[in-house]
Amino acid sequence: MQTVRLPQSELEKHLVGRPRHVFISGASRGIGEAVARLLGEDPHRISLGARSYNRMLGIAMDLGQERCFPVRLDLGDTTSIDEAIVASEQKFGPIDVLVANAGINLPTPIDDTTDEGRQRFRRVLDVNLTGTYFLAQRVIDHMPNGGRIVFVGSVLARMGVPGASGYVASKHALQGLVRAMAVELAPRNIRVNMINPGWVDTQMAHESLQRIAQASGETLQQTTAKMMSGQLIRRMIKPSEVAGYVKFLLSPAGDAITGQGLDLSCGQVLI
Ligand SMILES: NC(=O)c1ccc[n+]([C@@H]2O[C@H](COP(=O)([O-])OP(=O)(O)OC[C@H]3O[C@@H](n4cnc5c(N)ncnc54)[C@H](OP(=O)(O)O)[C@@H]3O)[C@@H](O)[C@H]2O)c1
């Protein structure tokens, strides 16, 4: 039987024989750090962006500073976004792959009409949506044809929960952005997707569980057990599992996927 050879994807053509430049936002800990460490097993050049410079420096030292570059990035500050991308492009050239992972989750209950409450709502939208979009815009400016963009969204792009309207709205909006960008960037063969994780074992999840436990008068263990009981697979997701999904999307096997929200939720949501 004759085997049919599929045409090489734009990314493969463009990147054959050279490692990619990958920029990861929110790379100082949690999911972003796991993505950096997993992709760091391959000979890529990796830029790490977040506010905690010393933590990123530690990761860069582990991966090798000749191919891993920590850069200060505050998604709430457009100057910081511009400067981070300029510095990273000066270091390793145009960015082939953006992993837009950074995000925050602050309490935003609907009945909180205080100035602080409104500030928190603005801050969540500013970092998770507006700053993330501005970051992507800067990267796309010089991104070679065939590049890839992966946003880290959330199952809360699929459903609502109490007390987190800012976060829920930001992640739903991010899903819209992914669809819009996938269409607009298709002529440049740039794939744009979003991974929507459920409960991932990081600082963010622990802070959220703590808040829910406090509000309901339960222990942390009781709240965690209750959350896990709403899933088909009753455990937290490991940051390395999200990293593995990112790696899949960047591989040739991910070449036919764009404009999608891909759930990784231990069966918390069934779409
Ligand atoms: N953990 C979960 O259960 C879960 C579930 C669904 C989705 N997610 C999503 O996964 C992504 C990563 O979260 P995580 O769980 O790894 O949380 P995490 O441990 O709290 O890490 C968040 C990362 O974002 C960075 N960050 C926060 N504010 C920033 C800002 N203004 N500018 C630049 N970077 C900023 C943090 O670094 P600095 O503080 O050093 O800036 C850190 O590196 C987020 O988008 C989150 O919404 C998480």
Image (cartoon, helix red, strand yellow):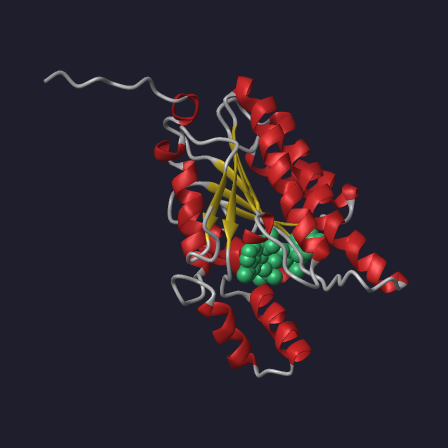
Q: Nearer the viewer, residue 201 or 107?
A: 107
- Percent position of residue 153, x then y: 57, 48
Residue 152 lies left or right of residue 15; in this view the side is: right
In the picture as drawn, the residue positioned furthest to the right comes out as 115
Q: Position of residue 187 (x, y in %)?
A: 54, 17
Q: Position of residue 40 (x, y in %)?
A: 43, 49
Does any portion of residue 217 appear in the rendered image? yes
Residue 55 visible to an observer of this rendering: no
Q: Nearer the viewer, residue 259 or 134?
A: 259
Indicate left or right for 152 with 78 as reference: left
User: Quarter of the image holding residue 117?
Assistant: bottom right
Residue located at (67% from left, 57% from top): 104
Q: Is residue 13 left or right of residue 131?
A: left
Given residues 245 and 12, the one toward you in this image is 245
**Whole-percent x and y of residue 195?**
50, 45
160 or 106: which is nearer to us?
Answer: 160
- Indicate the quadrant containing the N terminus: top left, top right, bottom left or bottom right: top left
Q: Residue at x 73, y 38 (%)?
A: 82
Q: Quadrant of ligand 1?
A: bottom right
Instruction: Count how many numbered circles sit on residues in the image.
Output: 0
Instruction: Kindly give the residue lying farthest to the left in the view shown.
Output: 1
**Residue at left offset 57%, top offset 30%:** 94
What residue is at 51 percent from the left and 56 percent from the top?
31
